[in-house]
Amino acid sequence: MPTILSHTAPILALGAGLGTKHVSPRLLLAAVFFAIVPDFDVIGFHLGVNYANILGHRGFSHSLFFAFCCGVFGFILAPFLHCRRPTAFFLLFTAVFSHIALDAATSGGFGVAAFWPVSDARYFFPWRPIRVSPLSLRAFFGARGIAVLKSELLWVWLPSAALLLILFLFQRGKKTR
Ligand SMILES: [Zn+2]
């Protein structure tokens, strides 16, 4: 996985870029939370669940179906999140979807079970520029950790910043029109 923090970058950029008129602070907070929810599956490692198992890391919680369910959850909770239902669906779905896409672009581990429950197969993108983050903290603090952070800055944070800038300019253009 990219580091937990980096998983929040694309959705932070999207939510902030769309502006508070569409995305309430509560919705943005929920979306950031849902961008890391798929990795709660690492608890399986401590419970003895095999990595390759669909309950294991990058299993069912890294599927489009799971992303859809999170979107539906947002749709239902929209009044509490102070936003329109389609916006809540879109943002929570995209939060989980971006997580899955980033994991599928990493250089190691197992692929994501993107098409569960239709298939348990694990998938990667053909092009995987993001260095996989070590799961143990000890391994993270060292040369490997620095290489991971460098690749995340380049392939996650930089495109996210570009997205934020584009959305910001687009919103400003709309206001001045
Ligand atoms: Zn993940």
Image (tube, rainbow, N blue to C red):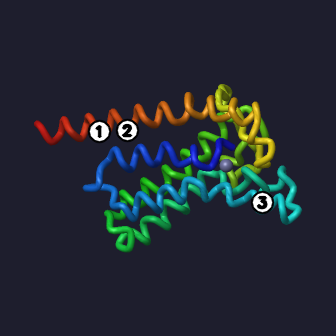
**Where residue 116 sits: x, y (%)?**
69, 53
Give 127 or 171, whichever is nearer the viewer.
171
Q: Residue at x 80, y 46 (%)?
A: 138
Which is more N-terminal, label 1 or label 3? 3
- Crowd tier of the residue under label 3, counting other residues whose Cα lies within 10 Å: few below 14, some 14–19, many 20 or above: some
CA gap, disc 3 and disc 1: 39 Å
Q: Is residue 166 above or below residue 114?
A: above
**Where residue 14 sits: x, y (%)?**
40, 45
- Crowd tier of the residue under label 2, counting other residues whose Cα lies within 10 Å: few below 14, some 14–19, many 20 or above: many
> Please, which residue is most extreme toward the bottom here?
80
Q: Is residue 105 above or below residue 39?
A: above
Q: Amino acid at mark 3?
A: Leu
Asked if marks 3 and 1 touch (Cβ < 8 Å), the reply is no
Q: Quadrant of the C terminus?
A: top left
Asked if marks 2 and 3 touch (Cβ < 8 Å), the reply is no
Q: Which residue is mark 2?
A: 164
**Where residue 146 sits: x, y (%)?**
69, 32
Label 3 C-beta lies within 8 Å of the nearest ligand 1 atom? no
Q: Which residue is mark 3?
A: 55
**Where residue 10 sits: x, y (%)?**
48, 43
Q: Is residue 176 left or right of residue 62?
A: left
Classify mark 3: helix, strand or loop: loop
Q: Amino acid at mark 2?
A: Leu
Q: Amino acid at mark 1?
A: Phe
Q: Which residue is mark 1?
A: 168
Q: Quadrant of the N terminus?
A: top right
Q: Is residue 10 above or below residue 77?
A: above
Which is more N-terminal, label 3 or label 2? 3
Closer to viewer: mark 2 or mark 3: 2
